[in-house]
Amino acid sequence: MKSCHHRIATAVAIAALAALSARVVVATPRALTGSLQRPQVIAWGACPESWVGSTSDSLGDRLQCGSMTVPLDHVAPDGRMMEVGVVRVRAGTRTQREGAIFFNNGGPGSHPGKLLQATAAAWARANPNDPDEVDKRRLSERYDFVAVIPRGLVGSSEFSCGPSVPRGFPFLPTHLDDDTWNLAVADARAVVQGCRAFESARYINTEQFVHDMDALRRSLGDDRLHFYGISYGGMVGAWYAATYPEHAGRMLLDSTLDFTRDYRMATRASMLALHGEFTRKAVAPLLANARRYGLGTSNDAASAIDELPPRIREVWVREMTLPVRLAAALHVASWMRRDNPATFDALAYILQRSPTSADHTLDRSIRWEASRLASVLYAPPRIPHGFFTATDQDAVRTLVPCNDWAWTRGEEAIRDTLRQDAARYFSVTGEETLDELVCLHWGAPSSRAPDLAHLGNVTPFLLIQSEKDTSTPIGGARRIVDRFATANMLLVRGSSLHGVFNYTTSPCVERTAARYLLTGIVPASASRIAACEGRFDNPLDALPGAAPALASVPVPVDVPLPAGHDEL
């Protein structure tokens, strides 16, 4: 196993920001106490491209970067410190500045720099005479947009703790044998051993991150911290508000992780939602038209799905999102059982001479998808499945859940769940199993979770939730609204987008979210849930001359939302 690398920087001069050194700063307890009482003075300057991507002149000197020296452990400081990077785009009209909006684009492990710069540049160009854009323009003029770079990422003591290429093992859901399992466990232990070599690894967690955010709030001199978080960023916002309710301002939580549950439960909810989408979008239409797809009766097709070869499931599981792709997989499986072609050319020969559907157009589509599948089936082996923690984002994504929650189930319980899930849910990939194995061997969490009851006393906050989001399913947002009287939801009907605001052509979504960030006004609804109807999920879907979105004002939802799948 290659040695891990880790950088904890101490440089405070902006010229050194792009080349942070690998040292831990040790301060005396007295100096540390004093630094915590006084807001830090940040040396703001030009941003390294590695932090924010390639820059343009549109923001000029409004775009700035710097760093803060913070304790490894804010709650129990012992003199060990680390450098944390910060990014801001200053308010366009400084004399009208009203505060700062903190950005977090989730992950864990996503770097906020590029999102912050792109959003700020887009909002600075917003048309002040367009009702769909005017509030974004006002936000750009009146608020600093800021982000703390999460610990472990480029700019904040970049950290990685794994080999560039893992030893690897076969696809777990279709290889449930002892040898494969033992390889997976061995890799999990190796990742843990590599990460434990560095003292900062246990302090890469949500608790320390929200304290880093508050250190930046104090440096900016603001009494309130306003927040826009996506996915896991919703949990960051909730933990901040629960930790610092007296300083929590407006919170826009877009496609939020269900922070009322632990990470394992949240990822299982996503797995179940993906299975439901597979059943709804691929299986049900195919079974309803099995003969049209050349698969006999619906019972014949159902049996063929159950008997799909493990190798096809392994390489094609993420592609079977449409009935034509599932049909292609079933036809390829049938040809392989019948003729056992040894090469791609042999299978291609069969494909050319074996009809699939009497419908010429559908037959051509199935053949096209079958050829794509064949090219993957006979391609040289890829890097085996395993733990990829060779980059900073991989390491942070792995460590934050381990440090935030207790993982108490033993190896056998984890393996039993994998067996059951692999048999029941076609879309299982085994990634949840790998995460849990690492966290099991990581040990006790280092985060001290805040009391979420404090969210009942903060400014009303707004969730944006796509109705068909499979990454953070609607059930989580519904639980948050049910639990906290200050929670409100903007439901986006028919959408499957994960990360909604700024990514739609819907005036209803864009106006409501921007208005909330600017004013704190939430949609009026007795249930605290309002819905947007629209034609397009994403601006890329909007063809020239197409009809606009249906409405610009959300409609109250005064009936209970459907429970959906929640077999946890």
Image (cartoon, grey):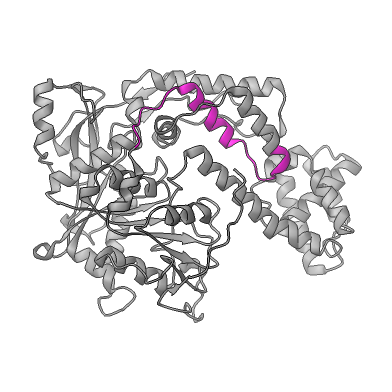
Look at the image and give the residue range highlighted in magenta.
422-449
In the rendered image, residue 244, in percent from the top left (x then y), is placed at: 24, 44
- Looking at the image, residue 397 sits to the left or right of residue 265; the answer is left
Quadrant into which the C terminus falls: top right
From what the image shows, is residue 51 above or below residue 144? above
Q: Is residue 344 above or below residue 470?
A: above
Q: Is residue 514 visible?
A: yes
Q: Position of residue 553 (x, y in %)?
A: 40, 77
Whether residue 170 is visible, yes or no, is: no
Image location of residue 90, percent across then percent down: 17, 56
Kindly identify the residue that appears in the image at 20 percent across and 49 percent down. Answer: 247
Residue 466 percent location from the top left of the image? 50, 61
Residue at the spot x=24%, y=43% of the render?
Answer: 213
Foreground: 455 or 514? 455
Q: Is residue 298 left or right of residue 492?
A: right
457 and 156: which one is in front?
457
- Give residue 442's quadrant in the image: top left
| Side of 241 where 141 appears, left or right | left
- Which quadrant holds residue 437? top right
- At 11% from the left and 39% from the top, the residue drawn is 40
Tell me where residue 133 sits by quadrant.
Answer: bottom left
**Residue drawn at point x = 42 percent, y = 44 percent:** 107
